[in-house]
Amino acid sequence: MAKCSGITRAGGACKGIPIDGSQWCYVHHPDHAEERRRHGSKGGKRGGRGRPQGELARLQSRFEELAESVLEGTVERGVGAVAGQLLNGARACLRDAMAAREQEELLARLEALEEGLAANAGGAPSGKGGQRWGA
Ligand SMILES: [Zn+2]
């Protein structure tokens, strides 16, 4: 079977299978390279330093690099599968961290709201229900 005439980043001949009757695999086909670059620039809109969105974008590019390496034949399928699972683990941690941060923010806002309510209630007469929101 014909092989892609592209060169991998490792400098070797690509083992990918040519598509659309061309001499390049999906990774090395000029048309798709252009397409991939467009997708990439769209994903480049990331949040500020250390923001979860930035981390997600970084993970996404790692997944894409890994897929590319497996397609190019520079990474064995088995190795790629394990690496993919590990990356997935990292993604799960990131997702949990994002959820935890969100919850902390919500709690902080709730506490601020309660403080505001308590402050408002401060001048109220000491009738029943005055201490409802606590100190
Ligand atoms: Zn190729």
Image (tube, grey):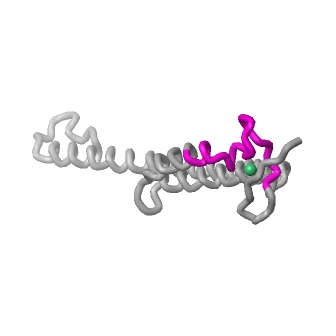
Q: Is residue 69 left or right of residue 104?
A: right
Q: Is residue 92 magenta?
A: no
Residue 69: x percent and y percent? 74, 54
Q: Is residue 30 magenta?
A: yes
Please state which of residues 42 and 132 is positioned toward the viewer in this rendering.
Answer: 42
Q: Is residue 96 left or right of residue 109?
A: right
Looking at the rendered image, the quarter that the N terminus falls into is top right
Predominant SS of the magenta segment = loop
Residue located 53% across and 52% down the image: 57
Please state which of residues 118 and 61 is positioned toward the viewer in this rendering.
Answer: 61
Residue 9: x percent and y percent? 71, 62
* Rendered image quadrant of residue 74: bottom right
**Where are the magenta residues, as a range?**
14-34
Q: Is residue 26 above or below residue 79?
A: above
Residue 17: x percent and y percent? 80, 43
Q: Is residue 103 above or below residue 74?
A: above
